[in-house]
Amino acid sequence: MLYGLMDCNNFFVSCERVFRPDLEQKPVVVLSNNDGCIVSRSNEAKEMAIPMGMPFFQLKDIDPLGQVTAFSSNYVLYADLSKRVMSILSDTVSETMPYSIDECFFTIDADHDKATAIAASIPAKVRKWTGIPVSVGLAPTKTLAKMACRFAKKYKGYNSFCAIDSADKLIKAMQLVKLNDIWGIGRRTIKTLNKAGLFTAADFCNLSEEQVRKLLGLNGIRTWQELRGEDSVKSETGLEVKKSICTSRSFAEMVADIDDLRPMVANFASQCASKLRAQGSAANIVSVFVASNFFRSDLQQYSNICNVALDEASASQIDIVKAADKGLISIFRKGVTYKKAGVILSGITPSNTRQLSLFTQSEEVQNQKKEKLSKLIDKINESKGMNTVHLASQLPHSGKKKNNDTGATVFLNNLRRDHISPRYTTDWDDIIKVKS
């Protein structure tokens, strides 16, 4: 069996270019929250030696003429286009195993030649139907598929598709690939291998299993086996169950009023609850933290965290938002201007095996109603867009839309997004207007 990997090229930048074809072949970057750092670059921006993670304010040093077009992160747009790309892949192959917002492993239930032909057709198909350029790699293992995909993306001669499906191709690939380009080998691991005189994938594969075990342990053996063509990485079709879930944010402008802070914390708590339900879990502890701006020595400094224990583990945003609000009220201090806040869920257990409280039987009907309500909210928000249905406590008290936010969200997130693009595919007000 062959594994494939589809990887969207410079995904955030590509999403922006779908609706701005005038930016093709021009340097483009996408910024992190609050327009802080560069998190996605076009190939043209990479050629200008603009590093990943560089603070946005330093861009003018590399680009004094302003040739680079910058966009604030538009995650609603990116998530919607990702869903469309993954849908096309799902309709084309036998099984998909999503790895991230812009990567997905897959298998094709067909003989070698037919599977190769189908995989090779994916880049053109996705580009034609969505406008997003993708690269595809095909190989006997997931690690080798990652490697093949890297070749497909790096070298134009592959036409966005590369297959490592023979012994000769495997030997050649092993000689070309450096250790830091191998999936599963991190910075610390590279240092260990370099000290042992190993620098390429071929050097690593020439070790014996016992040598690998001494250097890297069991995880190293799995990577070694994968590079030798042995399928050793277990397929994970479900979501990883996290032991804690956090949603937090630094604010563009500092907040001093608790009435402004409460809806933000309610939003964070609601997002945590949504993530919790997505992995089929419930949480016992809701933690809220706040912090002032520690870079402002002229202001009063303060930070605190409050843990609120639930009587019974829950995944309902009603319970979690209420607990988060209770925690915020207990640690809020007047006279402090806050720069950051967040919510953390812990004590996570599977929702079908959670420990019930002494009074659960009398509250069973109410709990069932909350679960049904949560499932309905998730279903609506999944099809109509995030926060289509929400709690009233998630809104600012004015309930008005923010004028400086294209897409006019009613949620008070206090984010700096000076370069945000429209939500072309999810907001009626942002649909492209074609002039006759």
Image (cartoon, grey):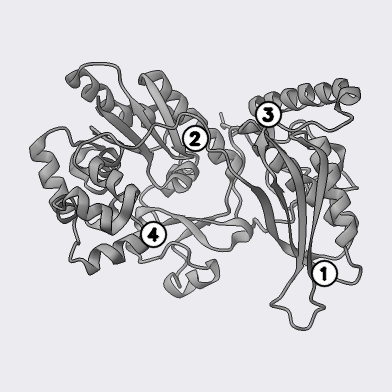
- Say few, some or many: other residues with alpha carbon within 10 Å of mark 1 (under 14 / 14 to 19 / 20 or more): some
* Residue extending furthest toward the top: 110
Most foreground residue, 73 or 401: 73
Dot in front, 3 or 1: 3
Query: In the rendered image, which residue does mark 1 sit on?
Result: 337
Identify the image quadrant of residue 76.
top right
Residue 409, which numbered label?
A: none
| Sequence-earlier tag: 1 or 4 | 4
Identify the image quadrant of residue 393.
top right
Q: CA distance from mark 4 to mark 3?
A: 50 Å
Q: Please report contact status of discs 1 and 2: CB closer than 8 Å, yes or no.
A: no
Question: Could you tell me the amino acid type at mark 1?
Answer: Thr
Q: CA distance from mark 1 to mark 2?
A: 38 Å
| Sequence-earlier tag: 4 or 3 | 4
Dot in front, 1 or 2: 1
Q: Please report contact status of discs 1 and 4: CB closer than 8 Å, yes or no.
A: no
Image height of 384 relative to 261, above or below: above
What element does badge 1 sit on? Answer: loop
Tell me the quarter of the image containing the C terminus: top right
Question: Could you tell me the amino acid type at mark 4?
Answer: Ala
| Sequence-earlier tag: 2 or 3 | 2
- Say few, some or many: other residues with alpha carbon within 10 Å of mark 3 (under 14 / 14 to 19 / 20 or more): few
| Sequence-earlier tag: 1 or 2 | 2
- Say few, some or many: other residues with alpha carbon within 10 Å of mark 4 (under 14 / 14 to 19 / 20 or more): many
Query: In the rendered image, which residue does mark 4 sit on?
Result: 45
Q: Residue at x 53, y 40 (%)?
A: 78
Q: Position of residue 287 (x, y in %)?
A: 76, 52
Q: CA distance from mark 3 to mark 1?
A: 42 Å
Dot in front, 4 or 3: 3
